[in-house]
Amino acid sequence: MRALDWAADEAALHGRPLRIVHASVGERFEGATPAEDLPEGATEAATLEEIVTTAEARARQRHPEIRVHAEVLPGEPVDVLVHAGEDAFVLVVGHRGHGALLRRLATGSIGPGVAERAWCPVVVVGHSAPERPSADRRVILGVGERTGGGTAQVAFALREAHARGCDLVAIHARSRQETRQNRPGPDSPAADTLLGAALPDQAALESGVTVHRQVIDGPAPHVLTQAAHNADLLVLGLRHVHGTVRRELRPTHHAALRHSPCPVAFVGVPWPSPRRPRAIDVG
């Protein structure tokens, strides 16, 4: 429900329609086998329709001004959501983020699996995401030595900050290895060059967003998840695995999935999509 609410808010923020998708494997989608915990005579297909109908009503109640469409599609969740996201403005998924599910958050599960393969930006909303934005609104942009999403990641972060009317904080987590390589302090030319190259002054000026650049000593997973407290969104870039459409999730990405107190956006280098972005999809 947190992911659904976040997606509805995003749709309203950008004036986009909201498409709600629930995936079900083939035999269950057909309703051939009643679930053990359903009332007698009820099929799983009917229950799935009830799920999306309830979700649609919730989104409409939260934002009556947006157009909402909900549907059940047959297939494995990752495959269905990646395909549905071919024409999406952004694709939103949720995870419970605790217990056994948390331990299974690795490549192949829904959140990471969708982030690796989706055509569009993917936002994962965890159980700890706030129900409403905090008063101290900001978007956090993680900047690495080789920022994965490049200009697409920066453009996405600027767009989200502008839509929210908040500041963008670009953060580079400086490792011990960098410190040993003649990089003595946060104000060193090397640090300034890195952040300046990732987020040029001209881009910030054109967007109308106030940008803050910070270099913080420490492991990137810890630095970024700590910075994400009271933030609206943490934006991370993804690089394509050489010669493939799949994007690579590194330890920092997995740590953000597990521990970020706010939603996490994964933005890769744009891959030619067969259709033009139109809607916000939530699965």
Image: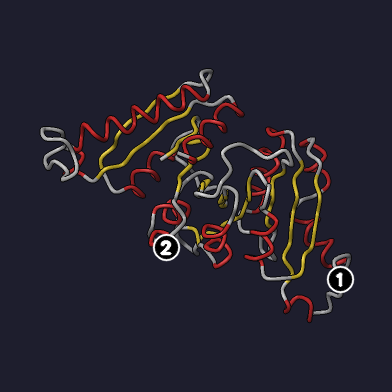
* Quarter where residue 223 is shown: bottom right
The mark that comes first in sequence, 2 or 1, is: 2
Q: Residues within 10 Å of mark 2 (few under 14, many from 20)?
A: some
Q: Is residue 244 above or below residue 275?
A: below
Label 2 amino acid? Thr
Gap between marks 2 and 1 measured at Cα: 36 Å
Q: Is residue 108 left or right of residue 65?
A: left
Disc 1 marks which residue? 185
Q: Residue 214 location in percent, x, y?
A: 80, 58
* Residue found 72% across the figure and 70% down from its top: 218
Q: Is residue 60 above or below residue 217?
A: above
Label 1 amino acid? Gly
Q: Is residue 68 above or below residue 47?
A: above
* Residue found 33% across the figure and 31% down from its top: 71
The kind of secondary structure element at disc 1 is: loop
Q: Nearer the viewer, residue 43 or 72?
A: 43
Disc 2 marks which residue? 107
